[in-house]
Image (cartoon, rainbow, N blue to C red):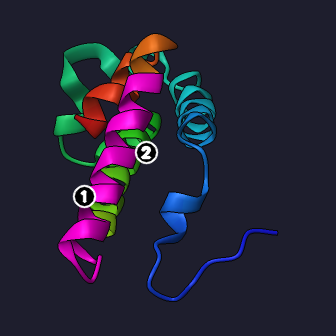
Amino acid sequence: MYSVSSSTSRFLIFPADEIAQQLTIYEHSRFRLILPSELRRQVWNKTNPEELSPNVTKVIKRFNETSYWIASEIVMQPNIKQRIAVLRKVINIAEVCIHSHACTRSLLLH
């Protein structure tokens, strides 16, 4: 088991490639569920998007949650040194995503 001090982000203990892989696996599982009808005429922007385009709205929600999580991990660090460490980790995750052609996730992280 990993040992984490109270001043260290748990985010930093996991390897960047492992985080990238897990983000990509989850993302892929959500994208696979999107039906062509959910993409026509941008129905996710209409009234009742959860009914007309449930899988697209779930992908959008996850995108926003992940963006918030990454930003929170950075700003919640108690000092600049740890913020830099988290930011470096985010950049490393994005690089792994780019090299594995998981471009959607890498755009989120950049």
Farthest residue toward the bottom?
6
Quarter of the image that includes the N terminus: bottom right
Q: Is residue 89 magenta?
A: yes
Q: Residue at x 45, y 23 (%)?
A: 97
Residue type at numbered disc 2? Lys
Magenta segment's dominant SS is helix
Q: Residue at x 18, y 71 (%)?
A: 80
Quadrant of the image occupied by residue 22: top right
Q: Which residue is drawn at 74% across and 69% down?
A: 2
Q: Nearer the viewer, residue 93 or 54?
A: 93
Q: Give the range drawn in magenta.
A: 75-96
Q: Position of residue 13 (x, y in %)?
A: 59, 60
The secondary structure type at the circle numbered 1 is helix
The secondary structure type at the circle numbered 2 is helix
Q: Residue at x 25, y 58 (%)?
A: 84
As drawn, the label of residue 18 is none
Mark found first going from the N terminus, 2 or 1: 2
Residue type at numbered disc 1? Ile
Q: Nearer the viewer, residue 34 or 46?
A: 34
| Residue to which mark 2 is pinned | 58
Give the distance between the C-alpha atoms of the residues marked 2 and 1, in whole angstroms. 31 Å
